[in-house]
Amino acid sequence: MGYNLSDKLVVAVSSRALFDLEAENKIFEEMGLDGYYDYQLQNENTPLSKGTGYRLVENLLKINSYFPATEKQVEVIILSKNNAATSLRITNAIKECDLDISRSGWTSGNDLSNYLKAFKVDLFLSANDADVINAIKSGVAAAKILPSHESVHDSLGDQVRIAFDGDAVLFSEESELVYKEHGLEAFVEHEKNNMHNPMDQGPFAKFLFTISNIQSKFKDKETPIRTALVTARGAPTHERVIKTLNAWGVRIDEAFFLGGTDKYEVLEAFGADIFFDDQDVHLNLSSSVVPSAKVIHESIEVYSRKV
């Protein structure tokens, strides 16, 4: 019987999300695919620097140390548009960093989202907008890794710390569209009128449920994962959020309702290994202090281009 991925937290990460391949990507843009492949082959044994997603991946894999080898909780898979020939530079870097990653897929430029369900993926991290959008369309939590300073790539501790925005990330985009189309007063009124109606699940709700399942295997203070909700909502619109999480029966360890103030200082204090948001106004600041990734919600993107 084959190895079962369905009962794991499965994270698929592109090579450019795990390692700093921005210079290589520039070579691809300037010299084309053949030039890029030649460069990678010639530099097969040249070390790679850590990328924005490295810190999260490293700490997630540490969770497995709490369990017998036959009961791993986390699997990380490399999914890349590189071809098999150029994959050795990536796998050499993984070996050099001593990351427990044994599974990979190399598609030679084809759409990565076609393979997410085959690998039972719960979270997909990529540096490519189209790949992220396609993954979300296929029902997988996905986000675009943003460039960050190398000072935020190293882990601050062994505990995984994951921070989420609320609307259009954990929750559906319904309320955020009300705000974008009709303004703050209409948004507040909408949330007050629907206070007792749980919000629909957003693209990262299922991922949160999977995390909560791992957390349930530990006593509260011993859990290797800690989560935070960091949202621009404030009173009274925070009440619907709390009631929604209670209705879902899901755990959030810390919650911050900032009432429109900047998020980055709270995220730095929390020590997030990754922060998921859909708004550039927050991500532009957060990416300077913690690894950050953008949830590209297509309908919101289309709306923002119209106004």
Image (cartoon, rainbow, N blue to C red):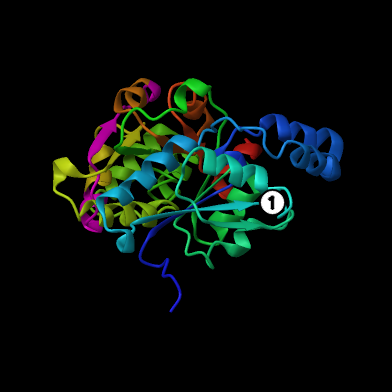
Indicate whether 270 appears above or below 210. above
Question: Can residue 303 be seen?
Answer: no
Near mark 1 (Cα within 10 A), the count class, few <14, some 14-19 or many ≥20, is some
Q: Is residue 8 left or right of residue 292?
A: left
Estimate the x, y position of residue 254 in percent, counting from the top left.
24, 36
Question: Which one is nearer the viewer's eye here, 225 or 128?
Answer: 225
Side of 233 where 21 appears, left or right? right
190 shown above or below 43: below
Direction bottom: furthest residue = 1
Quadrant into which the N terminus falls: bottom left
Residue 246 within the segment the image draws in magenta:
yes
Q: Is residue 60 visible?
A: yes
Q: Residue at x 60, y 38 (%)?
A: 304
Magenta stretch encompasses residue 250: yes
Q: Amino acid at mark 1?
A: Lys
- Asked which quadrant contains residue 72, the reply is bottom left
Determine the residue positioned at 40% across, 33% down: 184
Image quadrant for the C terminus? top right
- Read off the magenta span: 243-264
The residue labelled by disc 1 is: 81
Q: Nearer the viewer, residue 195 or 105?
A: 105
Residue 187 x, y percent position in the rendering: 38, 39
Apparent side of residue 88 relative to residue 62 in the rendered image (left or right): right
The residue closer to the viewer here, 11 or 232, is 11
Residue 125 picture location, percent across and down: 53, 46
Instruction: Kindly identify the residue that appears in the image at 66 percent across and 42 percent down.
Output: 89
